[in-house]
Image (cartoon, rainbow, N blue to C red):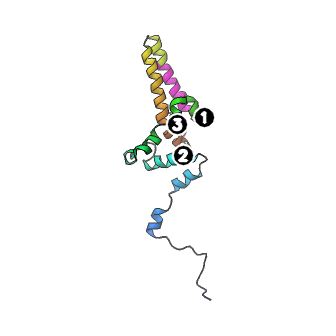
Amino acid sequence: MNESYNPYEVAPMSRADAAAAPRPERDAIDALRVSATWKRRFRLIDKAGGPELPHLRDLTFGERMSINFSVLGFFFGPIYYLCKGLWRPAIAYFGVAFLIAFIAALAGLDFLGKAAGYGSAAVYAMRAGILYYRKKVLGEEPWF
């Protein structure tokens, strides 16, 4: 019998295998208690370079849209943020939109109040993915 053979010995990794091995960030994202859709979005944000998204143009149009727009965030705004645990940005964005609408109503500029409502809905939709990434993956509690 060959005494030098060990069936439990781990073979050394080649460079190609080491490059293909999952990064620690990917393992951290896989360990999160979020849906598979959010894990996919978090990986796309990682691929785009993090919350600042410096490599956003490297993604396809569909990937960019999944990062940059949340339909639920658009229609439900502060309620959606509160459900996701993003109470600070919910309060901040709601306060800014309310203040603009209130000042516009006092000045008699109703169109500006409506624009503030639609604009805040767009902000809620566009920031939802990044803010949730910062909360879940980076462990931050962002205000904006």
Q: Which residue is mark 1?
A: 83
- Residue 37 numbered tag: 2
Q: Single out the mark in the foreground, 1 or 2.
A: 2
Q: Position of residue 56 (x, y in %)?
A: 39, 45
Q: CA distance from mark 3 to mark 1?
A: 15 Å
Residue found 53% across the figure and 32% down from its top: 89
Helix, strand or loop at mark 1: helix
Seen in the picture, residue 2 relative to 53 is either above or below; the reply is: below
Considering every residue shown, the one lying at the far left of the view is: 57
Is residue 134 highlighted in magenta?
no
What's the amino acid at mark 1?
Cys
Mark 3: amino acid: Pro
Q: CA distance from mark 1 to mark 2?
A: 16 Å
Determine crowd level at label 2: few under 14, some 14-19, many 20+ residues with C-alpha closer than 10 A: few
**First to last magenta residue range:** 88-100
Residue ID at (43%, 21%)? 115
